[in-house]
């Protein structure tokens, strides 16, 4: 229902009004298993099927332009980032990932205590082991090409594992103390210097639940509307956006569709909507 809520909030029309040509390719429909696997991980066999289907759809979409993947559970990123990584490899360009989320999602199926695979995509895309039965991630993203922005709920095991890597992880205290612009600008500079492709994965819970309540994993103290729009505008100014996930939108938990409208507004900022246009020479 998440993708349909974004359509109902007029995402295609908003992007068209900004001058973009929009092709809605509909919902991905994998072949799901008829007999669910038994085990501690919820719907693992279904997630494997989704990962295969989404990988193929993502790689094909990258050849047409800048794809926007609408969800849905953040587990869709198991497939979307894999497909974009395959496209980046075919172009012989490095892939960078900006993870806008309250959570680091660095678990594996063997370390998650909740059993939900929406907490594992970053683990998968960085090549962590334990994803038995999933398609091999042939082109894992090095940790130094990942920035996690807006963190405020990280399990102890994830924290310990992340601190041993070169990933950039920016929690809300860092944002409170120094703002969101400086670490994001540094990351975008890194992408530009490497002539990289940028995959942005935007989780509803990146935002504070007071402005975006339609998510099942609410964590107080998230990004404000102003901080989120600034991040999206900086991404747009950079000219680096190669793919965008909009995930974890649960219309059952929304209030008169306002979270869907917020996410559409943020997507519009990522694709060029401004109050005033400003010349930006930083990345040129």
Image (cartoon, rainbow, N blue to C red):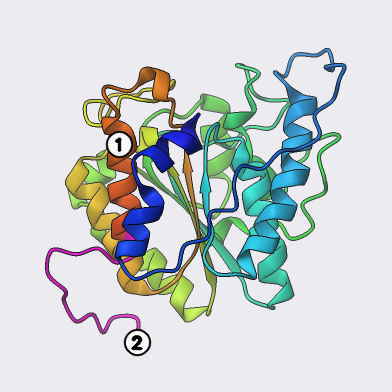
Residue underneath mark 2: 284
Residue sitting at x 63%, y 62%: 61
Position in image of residue 60 (x %, y %)? 69, 62
Mark 2 to mark 1: distance in Å?
A: 30 Å
Residue sitting at x 17%, y 48%: 226
Q: Please, what is the dominant secondary structure of the magenta stretch?
A: loop
Occupied quadrant, residue 203? top left
On residue 273, the disc is: none
Occupied quadrant, residue 5? top left
Which of 163/205 is in front? Answer: 205
In this picture, residue 47 sits left or right of residue 270:
right
- Residue 152 painted magenta: no
Is residue 64 visible to us here? yes
Occupied quadrant, residue 263? top left
Compared with 208, 234 (above or below) is below
Position in image of residue 214 (x %, y %)? 36, 25
Is residue 130 visible to us here? no
Position in image of residue 105 (x %, y %)? 55, 35
Residue underneath mark 1: 207
Question: Label 1 crowding class (10 Å Cα cut-off): few <14, some 14-19, many 20+?
Answer: many
Question: Label 2 crowding class (10 Å Cα cut-off): few <14, some 14-19, many 20+?
Answer: few
Compared with 86, 114 (above or below) is above
Magenta-highlighted residues: 270-284
Residue sitting at x 59%, y 66%: 95
Residue sitting at x 69%, y 61%: 59
């Amino acid at each position: 229902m998440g993708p349909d809520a974004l359509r109902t909030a007029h995402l295609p029309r908003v992007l068209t009004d900004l001058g973009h040509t929009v092709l809605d390719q509909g919902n991905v429909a994998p072949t799901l298993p008829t007999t669910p696997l038994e085990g501690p991980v919820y719907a693992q066999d279904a997630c494997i099927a989704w990962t295969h289907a989404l990988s193929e759809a993502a790689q094909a979409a990258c050849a047409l332009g800048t794809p926007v993947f609408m969800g849905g559970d953040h587990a869709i990123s198991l497939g979307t980032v894999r497909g974009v990584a395959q496209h980046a490899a075919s172009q012989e360009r490095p892939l960078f990932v900006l993870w806008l989320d309250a959570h680091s999602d660095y678990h594996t199926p063997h370390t998650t205590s909740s059993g939900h695979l929406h907490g594992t995509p970053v683990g998968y895309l960085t090549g962590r082991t334990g994803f038995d039965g999933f398609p091999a991630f042939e082109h894992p993203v090095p940790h130094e090409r990942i920035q996690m922005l807006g963190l405020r709920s990280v399990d102890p095991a994830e924290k310990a594992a992340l601190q041993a890597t070169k990933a950039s992880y920016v929690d809300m205290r860092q944002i409170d103390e120094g703002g969101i612009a400086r670490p994001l600008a540094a990351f975008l500079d890194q992408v530009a210097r490497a002539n990289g492709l940028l995959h942005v994965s935007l989780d509803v819970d990146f935002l504070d639940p007071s402005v975006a309540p339609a998510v099942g994993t609410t964590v107080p103290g998230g990004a404000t509307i102003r901080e989120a729009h600034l991040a999206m505008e900086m991404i747009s100014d950079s000219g680096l956006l190669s793919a965008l996930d909009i995930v974890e939108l649960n219309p059952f938990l929304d209030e008169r569709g306002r979270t869907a409208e917020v996410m559409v507004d943020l997507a519009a900022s990522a694709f060029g909507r401004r109050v005033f246009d400003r010349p930006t020479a930083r990345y040129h």
